[in-house]
Every structure is written in structure tokens, then in C-alpha cells.
Image (cartoon, rainbow, N blue to C red):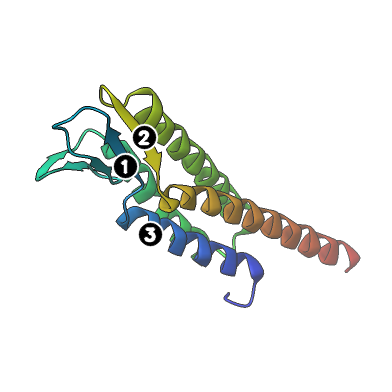
Amino acid sequence: MIQRIQTVYLLLALVVTILCLINPVGLYHFEQLGNTDATLYNLFIAQADVKSFGVWPLFALLLLTCPLTLLAIFLYKNRKFQARVCAYNILLCLVWIAVLVIFGYVNNPEGAQFTPFLWAAMPGVALILHVLARKAIIHDEKLVRAADRIR
């Protein structure tokens, strides 16, 4: 299981997703005096002891990605389903990026400028790792089919 390259890709994608899940992904900087900066996490926006849980879809999407990635790791005997689970993870990462853009740039608080942190790029890295894993899974399936055909 671990000797296959797609398992390594999936493990790295899981680690990157968990790192993004627990770290802040952006900062709202207010130009007006009297407003303190707000930090955007995947579950909430923290602004001076006040937490707003309006951004929970970011958390939900990443939280769904983690068990699906673990499921894909342990489905090494069923390569077709493993590739399908990777495709679902790719879709979830794309939706997370779209939701972040909506919350960060389109639906941001009045007079705030959004600055993403490095952790906001981690689902993009996970997306690339899922694409590489899916490509390796499909390649393995083709090799197995070719070996079966030769017999």
C-alpha cells in the first residue's frame, strides 16, 4: 500500500489539508480608524474577542476532504473507486477555493481589504496532489489490464 506513489501523494494531500484546516487563511484589514483587523479561519472570523461563524462552509469542505482522502488511501485494491474518490476530492478543493474567493473578496465586510495567508494556498497544493494521485491510479489500472490481457 505505502510503496505505491499515489499513496504518498494522498498522504501529502491529507497533511496539507489538515495544516490548512487548523491555521488562519486570511486577514481582513480595515481602513477605518477604530476597527481592529479580523483573522479568517476556516471555521470562524476572529476580531478582538468576537467570533463570527459565518464562514463555516470553508471548514465543512475541508473536513469532508480529510476522511475521503483517508478512504482513498485504504481503497488501494479497488482502483476504479479510488480514482473516483480522488475526483471527488479534486471537486471539493475547487469548491473550497471558490468559497474562499467569495468570502474573501466578494462578500467581505464593509471597508475591509482581504489579504490571504500562505495557508490559503494549501488546498490548491492538495488539489495538485490529488490530480497526481488520480493519474497514477489510472496508470496502475491500465498496467493491470494490460497484464491481464497478456495472460
Cβ atoms at labels 2 and 1 below 8 Å apart:
yes
Q: Is residue 131 left or right of residue 147?
A: left
Q: Amino acid at mark 2?
A: Phe
Question: Does residue 114 lie above or below 20 as drawn?
Answer: above
Question: Does residue 129 lie above or below 45 as drawn?
Answer: below
State the SS at label 2. Answer: strand
Q: Amino acid at mark 1?
A: Leu
Cβ atoms at labels 2 and 3 below 8 Å apart:
no
- Give percent across and percent down for residue 2: 57, 76
Q: Residues within 10 Å of mark 2 (few under 14, many from 20)?
A: many
For the residues carrying marks 3 and 1, which lies nearer the camera in this image?
1
* Residue at mark 2 to residue at mark 3: CA–CA distance: 23 Å
**Residue occupied by mark 3:** 18
State the SS at label 1. Answer: strand
- Give percent across and percent down for residue 92: 47, 41
Mark 2 and mark 1 lie on one chain; the one further toward the N terminus is 1
Cβ atoms at labels 3 and 1 below 8 Å apart:
no
Q: Quadrant of the N terminus?
A: bottom right
Tell me if I can see residue 67 in this picture: no
**In the image, what residue occupies the spot 46% across and 60% down?**
16
Tell me if I can see residue 114 in this picture: yes
**In the image, what residue occupies the spot 62% across and 64% down?**
6
Q: Amino acid at mark 3?
A: Ile
**Disc number for residue 114:** 2
- Give percent across and percent down for residue 13: 51, 59
- Looking at the image, the residue that sits furthest to the bottom is 3
* Residue at mark 2 to residue at mark 1: CA–CA distance: 6 Å
Mark 3 and mark 1 lie on one chain; the one further toward the N terminus is 3
- Give percent across and percent down for residue 26: 35, 44
**Residue occupied by mark 1:** 27
Q: Nearer the viewer, residue 147 or 22?
A: 22
